[in-house]
Amino acid sequence: MPYVIPDVVDVKQRKTDIGPPHYKNFLPPVIQKNYGDWKTHEILTPGLMVHIANSGDKIWTVRVASPRLLSTDTLREIADIADKYCDGYFRFTTRNNLEFLVSDESKVNPLIEELKAKKYMIGGIGPRVSNVVHTQGWIHCHSAAVDASALVKCLLDDLADYFTTKETPNKVRLAVACCTNMCGAVHCSDIAIVGIHTKIPRIEHERFKDLCELPTTMAACPTAAIIPDPAKKSIKLKEEKCMYCGNCFSVCPALPIKDAENDGVAIVVGGKVGNLRTPPKFSKLAVPYLPNNPPRWPEVTKAVRKIFDAYVAGAKKHERVGEWIDRIGWEKFFDVTGIPFTWQHIDDWTYTFETLRTTAQIKWVKK
Ligand code: SF4
Ligand code: SF4
């Protein structure tokens, strides 16, 4: 029988490929007028900055934290606040903070007062902690090894002072990804958390033949641990080759890998995307495994805090976490953070040679 489009969809009336609304229709008039013609900007407080145009015009930005997942009620409240103080203009930053854009200086302080009264967290500008780039976690994704929103709440509860007031040597970018797909910024952040599995996938042979494609499933495995099992019209695993990435489950639902007891997180450090002073860097493994312990993940928040405090105490002004580690060396990093160095830290992947120490230069660390 041919596929029939139900009557409720009027295909001829449907508008497609229209793209997003043009951003220029949503700019505050001061920004429209001075577009591309700015002289400077100044950070006035941890959550307030002013941009000054060559014409002398100014626009003030008040930044507040957002949990990223927002209800429509909250969005309506934000829109009401923007109507009251910002002629209706606000924006979201690339780290999902919220920025109110104020053209009238006399409205800046009343806006801040109302935001404080409504318990919004003001801050995140300059050398400090900003929002945590994160993912779907147990709220919405089928491959998560850890939750995202709850873990981010724990991390920022602990570091809230560094969002609102306290300074760090340079900005500290935090990120959470709930599996090794690493949606977001985990691979290029100062301190980041990634959900990991620690057990091999389970093979549901009966479902495999109905649900999965053999070539795609085999090709999804980075270590070639998957081989055909023609007798069962399924696959076999070379267990010793599996490193639990879960990539096979992404393409084949008959290979579930989630494990409530043994899933957890790894912590990676030292990544950056900017080109300031040093080229961008990938984050590297600091802590190979910590257990999932919801709702407050005490082991994880404690380990992040150890790294964070050691960086704040030891880094020079403007040094990012990766630059600080490059200067002091990894031996010293493990020493000052108290994190044990294990065999799991040693890369055994394709370009392992490049990560091995091919010099006699090492630092002895007193034990
Ligand atoms: S990181 Fe993994 S689990 Fe998290 S949203 Fe992306 S694909 Fe899903
Ligand atoms: S979990 Fe990863 S390494 Fe293990 S079999 Fe699946 S794809 Fe291969």
Image: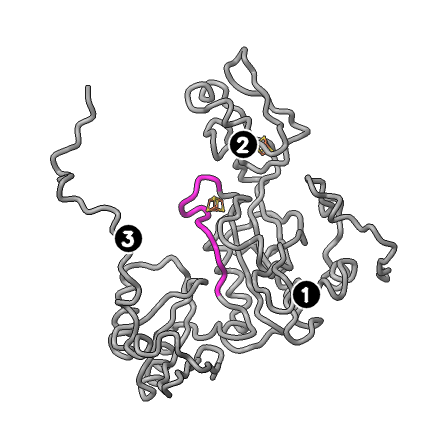
The residue labelled by disc 2 is 220
Residue type at the position of mark 2: Ala
Placement of 123 over or under 3, stated as above or below:
below
Q: Is residue 112 left or right of residue 41?
A: left
The image shows residue 4 at horizontal and vertical percentages of 17, 28
The residue labelled by disc 3 is 19
Separation (CA) of disc 2 from disc 1: 35 Å
Q: Quadrant of ligand 2?
A: top right
User: For mark 1, does the 10 Å Cα neighbourhood hold few (<14), some (14 to 19), or many (20 or more) residues?
Assistant: many
Residue 323: mark in rendering? 1
Residue at the location (28% across, 59% down)?
A: 72
Magenta part of the protein: which range?
131-143
User: For mark 3, does the 10 Å Cα neighbourhood hold few (<14), some (14 to 19), or many (20 or more) residues?
Assistant: few
Q: Is the residue at mark 2 in contact range of ligand 2, meaning its CB lies under 8 Å from it?
A: yes
The residue nearer to you, when weighing 119 against 282, is 282
SS class, disc 3: loop
- Quadrant the C terminus occupies: bottom right
Residue type at the position of mark 3: Gly
Mark 3 vs mark 1: in front: 3
Dot 3 or dot 1, earlier in sequence: 3
Placement of 207 over or under 163, stated as above or below:
above
Circles 2 and 1, Cβ within 8 Å, touching? The answer is no
Residue at the location (49% across, 53% down)?
A: 184
Separation (CA) of disc 2 from disc 3: 33 Å
The residue nearer to you, when weighing 215 against 250, is 215
Placement of 212 over or under 163, stated as above or below:
above
